Amino acid sequence: MSNASFVHLHVHTEYSMLDGAARLKDLFSEAKRLEMPALAMTDHGNLFGAYDFYKQATGAGVKPIIGCEMYLTPNSDRRDRTRVRWADGGENDVSGGGAYTHMTMLAADADGLKNLFRLGSYASLEGYFYKPRADRELLHRYAKGLIATTGCPSGEIQTWLRIGDFEKACASAAEFRDIFGPDNFYLELMDHGLDIETRIRQDLIRLGKRLNLKPVATNDLHYTFDRDADAHEVLLCVQSGSTMADPKRFKFDARDFYLKSPAEMRKLWDAEVPGACDNTLEIEEKIGDYSALFGSRNLMPQFPVPAGRPRSRSCARRSCAGWSGASPAACPTTGAPRRSTSWTSSSRWASRATSW
Ligand SMILES: [Zn+2]
Ligand SMILES: [Zn+2]
């Protein structure tokens, strides 16, 4: 692997519903063409695409890194469905109108992936308020095996920096660092040429130095190719119920949300923050494999069968017994047993089961 390479760790695939336009097939062929050793998926608040991503990545010879851009409560209980303001409620305040912040999380191994599934499930079942939200208590419970970052401009730390409260930002970052562990919590840096990124960048870097957080460069990837920016804009119209003719429609203020090459990413960061691109490779090396979860296994029930009798026939006979309430011995080796009920489908089922 070239030390001039780069791994994208913030990727919204087509499974970021109506927000990500990057098809998996395109992502992997482009990652291969650019000689990237691995690729992450970090869809918004869900892991619906995890298995598809794993399967296609391994098929394409690209190492899969499965993660999620998780929604967190603004330091409130996940069951508390009230908006939270840390400032005046303007555009610098908590995102989603005070409902949630963002955080990037990656599963370091199969156990971490199970924890990520648990976080996502509880966030949906118990923390849903505009988006599925996890809270501090869930993070404490399920942080094992996860690598996390300070996230995008909608993250808690960047929100405090925009509000102008550096100490609150440091306190938040220190709390997350202690939850995930000092080696598993990184300072995420993005540059899409947006004012919301540049105006707090120096504070963000200063915070990272104070807390000894390693920097990591990402691109908030929402489509694979730069030429997809227009199609993605139309997708956002579908999401928000607006049209391209509406000047006030929800849209991204840049056209940089594609799979940039290692050279493009290093041009952005190598001089300004040395190590920010190298650390994407460090994280990639920390990621184990998920085969304990996704590798092929025989999940059929195992039970002893009489010598010489096919397992499938014994399985059918036992199923018949369970269904009819009879003992397996009472089930014929051909045909289903007669039931004393008037449920007529039993005879239909029996006629289908004559090949035992
Ligand atoms: Zn975000
Ligand atoms: Zn994102």
Image (tube, helix red, strand yellow):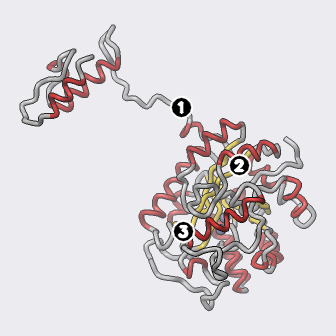
x then y, percent, for residue 60: 70, 37
In the rendered image, which residue does mark 2 sit on? Answer: 27
- What is the three-letter code of the residue carrying label 3? Arg
Q: Name the quadrant containing residue 291.
A: top right
Disc 1 packing (10 Å; few <14; some 14–19; many ≥20): few
In the rendered image, which residue does mark 3 sit on? Answer: 136
Instruction: Tell me the distance, in whole angstroms, between the alpha carbons under discs 2 and 3.
Output: 33 Å
Disc 3 packing (10 Å; few <14; some 14–19; many ≥20): some
Q: Residue furthest top?
A: 308
Residue at horizontal 80 percent and vertical 56 percent from the top: 260
Which quadrant is home to the C terminus? Answer: top left
- Label 1 secondary element: loop
Foreground pick, 220 / 212: 220
x then y, percent, for residue 34: 82, 46
Relative to residue 56, is residue 224 depicted above or below? Answer: below
x then y, percent, for residue 173: 68, 71
Q: Can you tell which mark lies on residue 296?
A: 1
Pointers 1 and 3 in contact (C-beta within 8 Å): no
Please tell me which of labels 1 and 3 falls first in the chain: 3
- Label 3 secondary element: helix
- What is the three-letter code of the residue carrying label 1? Ser
